[in-house]
Image: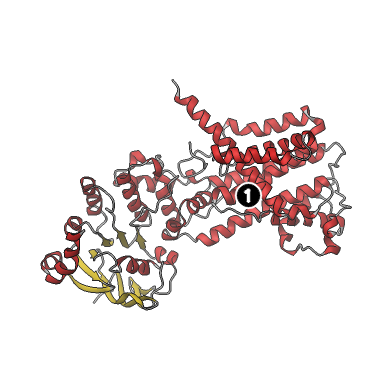
Amino acid sequence: MSAAALETRGLCKSFGALTVADDINFRLETGARHALIGPNGAGKTTFVNMLTGALPPSSGRIVLGGEDITAMGQAKRVKRGLGRTFQINALFRRLAVIDNVALAVAERRGVARRMLRAASTHADVCAESMDLLATLGLAEDASVRIVDLPYGKQRLVEIAIALGLKPRVLLLDEPAAGVPSLESHRILQVLDNLPKHIAILIIEHDMDLVFRFARRITVMVQGEVLVEGPPEEIAKDRRVHQVYLGEQHHG
Amino acid sequence: MSAHAGGYSADPRIRWIESLPWIVAIVAFFALPEYLSLGARILIYILYALSLDLIVGYAGIITLGHSAYFGLGAYVAGILAAKAGIGDPVVQLGAASVLLEIANKATTLTGGADGLSGVVVAPILGLFRFDIFGKTAYLYCLLVLLLGWWLVRKMIYSPFGTSLTGVRENSLRMHAIGAPVYWRLVLVYTLSATIAGAAGGLITQTNQFVGLNVLSFESAGELLVMLILGGVGRIYGAFVGPVVYLIAQDFLAKQFPEYWYFGIGTMLVLVVMFARGGILGILDGALVKLRGRP
């Protein structure tokens, strides 16, 4: 079996007596379109935070492209190709859209620490950032500050920043959160057009989006993996209906 | 109009309006010869405020400890001249930044609460002698400020400066894009402390005396008030603030020797309540309104 893009082995996390992740064995294949779903409090965000290095696991291992990254800091994981977006916008609000993306591009290119030349004379960073914005349909908004940008487009900038890191693995934490369903098709369109070689793990509550986008779905409940499989199987699975979709109908 | 300058879409060229402070400084030199010592003090505080703006305005970290660096610079300059006989200001300024860490408060060295007098400042580079009218001191401070401003401005427009703004705007995201946030902050603190130390050195060289007040909490608080008055995170807020504050202080202290702090306090309250962007923020707002009209 070839190395997965990202893999966890026996990953656990507990806060005192409370276990929020219990023996998670998870495999994200190269170029995957994988969704992680589960009711609120299932431990999805905790899982993602352990993957990115924001939260140290209590035990278990995380392997990125064959390399054990369990003890590695967040920045190093990013350098090795692990990118993420946030459920709640984590943008540079008073900066222009182009600066939001360029910050990420400059970090990846290793020029972010330079202080002798003006940022705008780094033509490679600027050009790459503009190209990226153009592919997301944001070129016209390049000089608009985030605070002046409509929310739907802010969600796209959220993705654009992560893409500026040229990740091999991209973790999308509810990319359509808060976006009216009329506009969420734009997000889906962007997701569909992401480069095929990027392995994508999406955490999402919008089931339409999940079933249209994902080719594989993992269902998490109370810190454990309940079931994993292709969308058709998950849609039919009785346990999933009980535990997850059941709760969806309530609220 | 955004509060911050710099960024990947910003034009780094110097605009004509940016020459205004320097023109004012030169005009003041010829027009107000009797105020040169106040002028030099203002120039020094501008440099000091500029160093603070790097941390507060750009990296977004409030600090009340900046007088430590200013004071260290001041004492290093004083000790070098009074105890070690190294009186050349330019040599000192270089040494001050290197020796920041070895300075200490030992009474034999610093004179303790009485301050350190007997600071004899040698001619700058052996050429320009300090005169009693403060002409040399003023021009010397102006030159050092010009250098400091140039460095700070360059830094703010650079990728490094933009990444600092990124830390201010969202440090969570800076971590997530792989930025070594901690080391960025260490670097900007070091640069800022060096500039503050240089400003402290200037104070000693122009006053030929250094007292413990340079290290005091009041000194750091006063500086923060100046920066807030002028406008935080705008480079030129650091120019406007000290000018307004120190001139107001000079004027008010003469008119109302006992109540002058009341005037300063009133200004600060008004700015904080009605003009969060400081005096420059008010000017910005007025400009936008003017331009908005047909």
Residues B39 and B123: in front is: B39
Image position, residue A144 (x, y; %): 39, 40
Residue B74 higher or lower than B182, as above or below: above
Left or right: where B83 falls relative to B261: right
How packed mark 1 is, by other alpha carbons closer than 10 Å (few <14, some 14-19, many 20 or more), is: many
Image position, residue A151 (x, y; %): 32, 45
Q: Specify whether residue A46 is in view.
A: yes
The residue sitting at the right extreme is B118
Residue A2 higher or lower than B140, as above or below: below
Q: Specify whether residue B236 is in view.
A: no
Residues A73 and B3: in front is: B3
Residue A54 higher or lower than B156, as above or below: below
Number of marks present in the image shown:
1
Left or right: where A243 falls relative to B201: left
Classify residue A16 by image quadrant: bottom left
| Residue under the point 15% across and 71% down | A239
Image position, residue A250 (x, y; %): 19, 60
User: Identity of the amino acid at label 1?
Assistant: Leu
Image position, residue A190 (x, y; %): 25, 50
On the rendered image, what quadrant is the C terminus of chain B found in? top left
Q: Which residue is mark 1?
A: B52
